[in-house]
Amino acid sequence: VQLQASGGGLVQPGGSLRLSCPASGLTLDRYYIGWFRQAPGKEREGVSCMTSDGRTYYADSVRGRFTISRNSAKNTLYLQMSTLKPEDTAVYYCAASSDYCSLEMDYWGKGTLVTVSS
């Protein structure tokens, strides 16, 4: 199983980025899939999750600004991030689980760094 987050970078406050996470070795439609982040000096936290039947959940801090989605044909997970704030700066990870979304996901990808700064 391989998950590889990409799309991070440096963006100004108020800007947008789209993260991608293509998967191999598993079919995303059959899993709970999510995005997590870890800011410097802080613990990893959940950002957004999508269930196998398409329900979505968001952390309060990103609701209304971030959108999780998946492309079944490409077996890829996305996170569209808008109105970015400096406090969104973190390494972002994609992950998958056969049970439910939590910090104890079964499979983790390498992270991608998002820096929000002027």
Image (tube, rainbow, N blue to C red):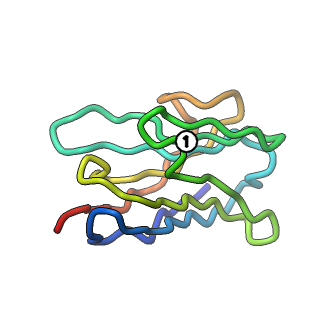
Q: Position of residue 70 (x, y in %)?
A: 71, 59
Q: Position of residue 109 (x, y in %)?
A: 48, 54
* Residue closer to the observer: 41 or 86: 86
Q: Which residue type carries mark 1? A: Ser
Residue 58's place in the image compared with 21, above or below, is: above
Within-10-Å neighbours for mark 1: few <14, some 14–19, many 20+: many
Q: Quadrant of residue 9?
A: bottom left
- Residue name at image x 51 percent, y 47 percent: 35
List the residue tagged with mark 1. 48
Residue 103's place in the image compared with 52, above or below, is: above
**In the rendered view of the protein, which quadrant contains the C terminus?**
bottom left
- Residue name at image x 72 percent, y 54 percent: 26
Residue 101's place in the image compared with 94, above or below, is: above
* Residue closer to the observer: 55 or 72: 55
Left or right, 28 with reference to 63: right
- Residue name at image x 50 percent, y 63 percent: 4
Residue 79's place in the image compared with 52, above or below, is: below
**In the rendered view of the protein, which quadrant contains the N terminus?**
bottom right
Q: Quadrant of residue 49?
A: top right
* Residue closer to the observer: 31 or 51: 51
**Judging from the image, what secondary structure is the residue with disc 1 in?**
strand
